[in-house]
Amino acid sequence: MNIILSGVKPTGIPTLGNYLGAFKSFAKMQKEMSDYEIFMFVADMHAITVPQNPQELRKNIKNVAALYLACGLSPENLTLFLQSEISEHLELGYVMQSLCYMGELERMTQFKDKMAKQETSITSALFTYPALMAADILLYDAKYVPIGDDQKQHLELARDLAVRFNNRFGETFTVPEGIITKTGARIMDLQNPTKKMSKSVDGDKGCIYLLDPINVVKKKIKSAVTDNFAKVHYDVENQPGVSNLMTIYSAITEMSYDEIEAKYAGKGYGDFKSDLAEIVGDEVSKIQEKYNYYINTKELDELLNKGRDKAKVFAQRKLKKIYHKLGLGRY
Ligand code: ATP
Ligand code: MG
């Protein structure tokens, strides 16, 4: 059986970046690749690599699960579960750590970025997190992993570890392939367009959270940083703010950059921004409508129970094989 798998950390309210870079493509894939099984999990174990407030974490876990569905994933042909409810992720995570070199983890740019920001409070789990992420994927022999562009390096490591294990212990893991959406590959902060929009980073104004009130969503778009060129033109180097807004525009409307440029030729940023504010506002309000349904019904918990039971069967079976290959245990 072929599996598409992805996870999102409940480190805050998911953002427009998460939606355009990840959630949106999950739904598309589910429709287009109907002969694949879709496994989606809430990566709550990854969330605690940085400090979390337990009450908020519990809420965020439910929010991420509900938003998967609100962003268009259909509950049919979907295995939706929490990472912390399948202990095999951690067990295989340890196995992956025993295959993975310090140097490989030290090279991860996300770790280096966080290191630069947090200085002394980096946990060892944050350092080893890519090994756990490799386990998340390899445990289910996922063939495709839809991810945002920022996860490319981690996926590459998962592939290396799969190949390393297979070479040492015999064919065991499917080597996963990342699927990165063309548009919306990386949405940047609206106030600081050289930094990626991130749910766990403070800086409220530059980040659109999927549960923001719609008037706030629109206001954030309208007050996004642009430049003095007064020309809607895609040029990441010289016009990073406008280019980021064009990326958002294009990802939602599926218009190309050329088409957007032509539409706003000779106009300033005012029209462009107000149109985009409406476009994003409409998109987010559709998501919130479905979110409100799922967060208030028993259906979400039922789906999570069903997903947990199914994922558990897969995970247990796979881990047993892996331990056997490694020579662990008595059989
Ligand atoms: P954190 O700040 O806690 O790392 P995050 O916003 O980066 O949160 P993740 O849970 O790490 O979110 O990632 C969830 C998915 O969203 C991943 O597939 C990731 O590649 C994608 N993603 C995250 N940020 C962006 C972004 N700014 N643009 C596009 N895709 C993104
Ligand atoms: Mg991230």
Image: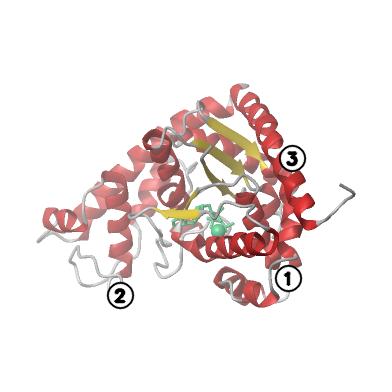
- CA gap between label 2 and label 3 equals 48 Å
Front-most of residues 93 and 224: 93
**x and y, in percent, of residue 64 in the image:** 57, 41
Tell me the number on the disc at residue 237.
2
SS at mark 1 in the image: loop
Of the pair 137 and 168, the residue shown nearer to us: 168
Crowd band around label 1 with a 10 angstrom C-alpha radius: few (<14), some (14–19), many (20+): few
Q: Which residue is mark 1?
A: 121
Q: Earlier in the sequence, mark 2 or mark 1?
A: 1
Disc 3 packing (10 Å; few <14; some 14–19; many ≥20): some
83 sits to left or right of 24:
right
The amino acid pointed to by label 1 is: Ser
Which amino acid type corresponds to the residue marked 3 in the rendered image? Gln
Pointer 3 residue: 316
Quadrant containing the N terminus is top right
In the image shown, does 194 or 105 lie closer to the viewer?
Answer: 105
Task: Write the residue at 59% across / 35% down.
Answer: 80
